[in-house]
Image (tube, rainbow, N blue to C red):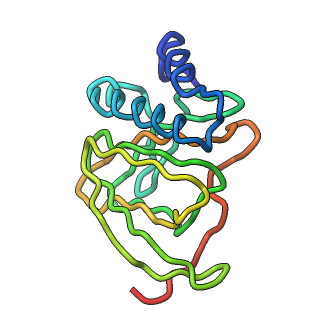
Amino acid sequence: MQGYLNEERRGAVLRSLRTDEGTLSRDYLAAARTVLRELVAMPDLVQRLPLERKPAGYTRNLLAGNDAVSVWAIVWAQGATTCIHDHHCSCCFGVVSGTVTETWYRAIDATRAVPTEEQERQAGYVACMLPSGPNIHRMRNLGAGDAISIHIYGFDHEAHASSIETQYTAVGG
């Protein structure tokens, strides 16, 4: 499935993300931001990839991965939404095209959270967060048409099915 990027580009991306301190360091986050800025600056390249899509949902397409990181292109159909969640690993993302609405939450107990902020993330936006938080959020495509984002997670895609640690239920808002 890692055939979306050619072998040379996949290798370059994975080498760029390798740091001596691992995926929980500032060096790693800086490297991930650099990679994301480069990828979101090439929307034509990303949009030409043969990415899988789901009507009314979102689809994760593995672009590159190894035992430390995984890089995904996510195609968001109109109306697609994630659950409210946090992450067990570092999570960085950049918007290639369209707009993804990100809503931030604050946990009030182990499974419930209240919304605190909502932002529209436009093409070119890049952000990184560590699992130490706060990092509870939900992402949605409220726009017309598809949106595409690139996500870099600090986990081995063969060892974990997802970067999600805990799912929350919204209380209020």
- Where residue 128 sits in the image (x, y, percent)? 45, 48
Instruction: Report the residue at 63% width, 84% height from top.
Output: 109
Total marks shown come to 0
Quarter holding residue 30: top left
Q: Farthest top residue?
A: 8
- Where residue 112 sits in the image (x, y, percent)? 59, 82
Instruction: Report the residue at 58% width, 24% height from top.
Output: 2
Q: Is residue 154 above or below residue 106?
A: above
Of 74 and 57, which appears nearest the observer?
74
Of 7 and 109, which appears nearest the observer?
109
Q: Is residue 43 above or below residue 161?
A: above
Q: Is residue 1 visible?
A: no
Of 127 and 45, which appears nearest the observer?
127
Q: Is residue 10 above or below residue 141?
A: above
- Which quarter of the image is occupied by the C terminus? bottom left
Instruction: Report the residue at 65% width, 28% height from top.
Output: 20
Would residue 67 be found to the left or right of residue 137 on screen? right
Would residue 29 be found to the left or right of residue 46 on screen? right
Quarter holding residue 21: top right
- Where residue 43 sits in the image (x, y, percent)? 28, 30
Instruction: Report the residue at 46% width, 51% height from top.
Output: 58
- Which quarter of the image is occupied by the N terminus? top right
- Where residue 70 sits in the image (x, y, percent)? 59, 35
Would residue 148 be found to the left or right of residue 19 on screen? left
Q: Farthest right residue?
A: 159
Q: Is residue 130 visible?
A: yes
